[in-house]
Image: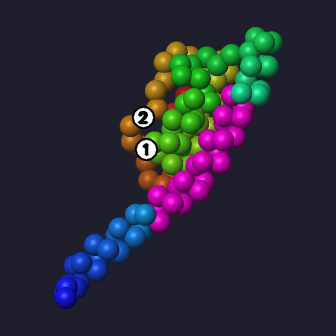
Amino acid sequence: MRIVRPKDIGFAFSQTRASFAAIMRSILVYPALGLLRLYQIAISPALQAVGVRCRHTPSCSHFMMEAMRRHGFWAGGWMGLARWLRCNPWGTCGPDPVPMEAPGPWYMPWRYGRWK
């Protein structure tokens, strides 16, 4: 018979909490990734046919997909929104990779994206 110590309970709780966070992340991220993929397949080619193209590398939809995979729905969504708002004739252009770490706490989402 195994003796359960209080530190073992804390470890099990942290594992349960981490797995719950992973499940919630996937519940929100996968539908959003599906919508982005639908945009890439159905809408983006029509926009490119009339001359509307993304000014950045990777494209804004690819950037948002990678940001959501790496940082989750909340942080990745804010990073993608900031990138999409920068993609205009007066905005930035060129290579713009997804950052490795989210640059702020979850309750300050405006710090996630580069707005200029």
Report the residue at 73% width, 23% height from top. Answer: 44
Report the residue at 40% width, 63% height from top. Answer: 18
Disc 2, disc 1: CB below 8 Å? yes
Element marked by disc 1: loop
Q: Residue 23: say if magenta.
A: yes
Residue 112, can we see it?
Answer: no
Name the residue nearer the viewer: 22 or 109.
Answer: 22
Residue 97 image point, x, y percent: 46, 27
Element marked by disc 2: loop
Name the residue nearer the viewer: 41 or 96.
Answer: 41
Quadrant for the C terminus, please: top right
Question: Which residue corresponds to mark 1?
Answer: 102
Question: Which residue corresponds to mark 2?
Answer: 99
Residue 115 image point, x, y percent: 56, 33
Quadrant hosting residue 64:
top right
Q: Main secondary structure of the magenta part?
A: helix
Instruction: Report, in whole angstroms, how far the alpha carbon at label 2 lies from the one at label 1.
Output: 7 Å
Q: For the view shown, which residue lies furthest in the front direction?
A: 1
Report the residue at 51% width, 52% height from top. Answer: 108
Residue 24, can we see it?
Answer: yes
Type of amino acid under label 2: Pro
Residue 65 image point, x, y percent: 56, 36
Q: In this view, does 100 lie above or below 59?
A: below
Q: Give the range drawn in magenta.
A: 20-40
Residue 59 image point, x, y percent: 59, 23
Answer with left or right where residue 98 lies relative to residue 81: left
Type of amino acid under label 1: Ala
